[in-house]
Amino acid sequence: MSPDRIGASVSADGAGLHRLDRLLGGEPAAWLVRRARDRLEAGRPLTGTVTLIAATPEQRRAVERLTGRAARSGTSLSVSLTEVDRILRDSGAAPGGLAEAVTRLVGPLRDLTRERADLAAAWDAAFAALDEAAAGRDELARWRGWLDATGLVRRLAPEPDQARLLLLQVAAVLRRLPSDSVPIGRLAAECCGDAHALDDGRPVGTLALSAVRALAGLPFAAEPGADSRRSAWAAVGVHLDELSSLVLCLGLPGDAETVLGRMLASCREAGQPAMLTLRQLRCHDDPLRADLVRICENPVVVAAAADEFGARCQPLVCVGGQPSAAGWRLLDLLAASGAEFGYHGDFDWGGVRIADAVRRRVNWRPWRYDHVAYQSAVAAHPRHSAVAAHPHQSAVAAHPRQSAVAAHPRQSAVVAHPPGPLAGLGRLTGDPAATPWDPELAVAMRRHDLRVEEELTLDDLLQDLGP
């Protein structure tokens, strides 16, 4: 191209820029340029009308200068993008129309559609390890959806790269659960490279605890308090320390050769319950001998059996709700000797889930814990309003059992229970759960919609615990 033609081109470009700046440049027209830019970046066409509410006089004059006619009266200001595109093309200010004008005024545009797709792909990649660890585990499926619904991960790790590292550690923890028995510090060190990664309040600990609660059949959001955290972790075989993890038992035979065996034998001879720590149980390697061991959910059963039978009580273990790590260890030691188990718990959905968790660990037969026993208990007690806010809140203090005990010959079994009227049964709460040992039990519970706490069946249970 000759110098004369180059100069002419530069002159034309300069004239076009001048016309463009006169028509769309400056702050009064900036809102119109921004609206057009937003549409382009979102992949939308530059058609239709855009409206500015409460336009200033300067903004109205800018539009009048652009369109060559007076704006309509009123506080709002509407502009046809199609008309602006035509004006810019016809005037030579932007031969490529409004899209060209926006690029020349504000610079390169972002491709928001591509950016959103890339961001979504990055988040999918961040969750990949967690999704793999949770695949095929039905108890984690709803929890995984809960994570998305609550946005918990994105609050803890706002960027995909941060989330990927966080979820890699959570996935490593999940692959190790449930465990036979492992200290939480060791689990954290081996899975996360940091012995404190699963501490309360740490991001990995927060997410892992919600998953642990899912595995235990508990609400995903953590409840306040160290006891709740300890019991949730214990349900999957993780203990926070060896001395605070406890299990209550009564009448286990023990032996004369080991420290734990002598302790159990001494307590049985005295007719007293034994409270065992995880440390004591972990230091014992031999199976604990027993024939039939009955398992209950609530300590009041142990207390009543000790009062009634003392040293003559049949072997009894209380899991105390969700079994602790000590509880799991004791059951494992008994199962290793070939002991058989009978299980009873609260007739509510939480109790059913606890029972099923124990059943997956040690095979048991129902001990007055089937649809026949449930329907009998419902028929035996009056139906009043719900009396306990939590499905595992003890009914002993608030709902004494005077009338039920008065008809029972074992008066000594009620020493710990103050007199008072027999309370009725509360409604079931929470999501229904399956009862694979007796499918008709879940059917009956849904039909009656009544909760029967273990304390209200105590008289029947005592009949089976004597010599």
Image (cartoon, rainbow, N blue to C red):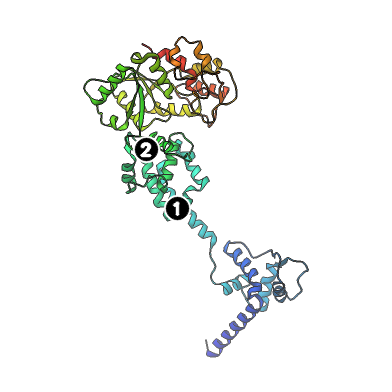
Is 360 in front, or is 309?
309
* Alpha carbon separation for disc pair 1 and 2: 23 Å
Does residue 209 appear left or right of residue 265 in this picture? right
Amino acid at circle 1: Ala
Query: Which type of secondary structure does the marked residue at label 1 adopt?
Result: loop
* The one of 173 and 109 positioned closer to us in this rendering: 173
Residue 272 sits in quarter: top left
Q: Residue at left 49%, top 16%? A: 373
Disc 2 residue type (three-letter) = Leu
Q: Counting other residues with Cα less than 10 Å from the Cα at mark 2, is it few (<14), some (14-19), or many (20 or more)?
A: some
Residue 157 is tagged as 1
Res. 271 visible in picture: yes
Q: Residue at x 62, y 81 (%)?
A: 18
Frontmost of labels 1 and 2 is 1
Q: Which residue is mark 2?
A: 177
Q: Do the CB atoms of the residues marked 1 and 2 lie less than 8 Å apart?
A: no
As drawn, which residue projects farthest toward the right? 73
For numbered disc 2, what is the local secondary structure? loop
